[in-house]
Image: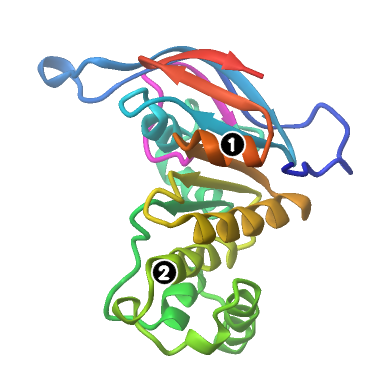
Amino acid sequence: MVAEHHQVLSEQRMIRLEHIGLHYGEGSQKGPVVLHDISFSIEEGGFRWLRGPSGAGKSSLMRLMHLAVRPSVGALTVLDIDIVKTRRAALAPLRRRIGMVFQDFRLLDHLSAFDNVALPLRIAGRPEAEIRSDVRDMLRWVGLIDKADQRPAEMSGGEQQRVAIARAVAVRPNLMLADEPTGNLDDVQAERLMRLLAELNRLGTTVVVATHNDALVARHPARSLVLEGGRLTSDG
């Protein structure tokens, strides 16, 4: 069972959505509504599965929580910040507190595993000596310290996904989002990845994992947000 962080027992909320709707585009280019009247909240240190079939709206909801898009209607609060009322330029520091792991890894092919993990720290202007120490710690945590100099093409899919996890965790996020992170992995690698995410959650990070892998959910019971046709059908 996925263990949630229970040192914080107050009603602090990491994420709150109230009657959220989302469509892409504006004016004559306005697309169909992809999310309809979504309301839920996730407590600080919580864990949620985000479930539903392909096309249900999971990736769009993940993009909202990652602040890649704003809701078309409704209220969105992340880390106590009202996203709708906050200027886009002011959201950059907030996004650095959110880690994101994608199904397709999104590693830079010309960089080593070490440099892929170091990239967000360098962008943030951290001292190089501090970066070297932190990146080695992250690679050791995901079991890849011996692969530090290898490029993505020289690594297996499971190893690449663990590099992606290390890159997301290196910034010490308050919130970790994983969008179908096990979709390209075999069962053994998927289980290893879930152990890393569960450990991160035990350390206090709020974690949301989007998946359509019912067997994985059954092996790691936790509360689920269930989407169908862009609507939330279950929050429990």
**Left or right for 23, reference 189:** left
Give, as a three-letter code, the residue at label 1: Val
For residue 25, which quarter of the picture? Answer: top left
Q: Closer to the observer: label 1 or label 2?
A: 1
- Residue 4 occupies which quadrant of the picture? top right
Q: Quadrant of the N terminus?
A: top right
Is residue 144 at all visible to an observer of this figure? yes
Q: How is the image coloured?
A: rainbow
The residue located at (44%, 25%) in the rendering is 52
Does the magenta-highlighted stretch encompass residue 3?
Answer: no
Q: Where are the magenta residues, as a range?
A: 66-77
Q: Which mark is residue 160?
A: 2
Measured as percent of width and height from the top left, residue 205 is found at 70, 49
Kindly report the distance in space between the C-alpha atoms of the residues bearing marks 1 and 2: 22 Å
Label 1 sits on residue: 217
Give me the residue at 48% from left, 70% from top.
163
Q: Which quadrant: the C terminus?
A: top right
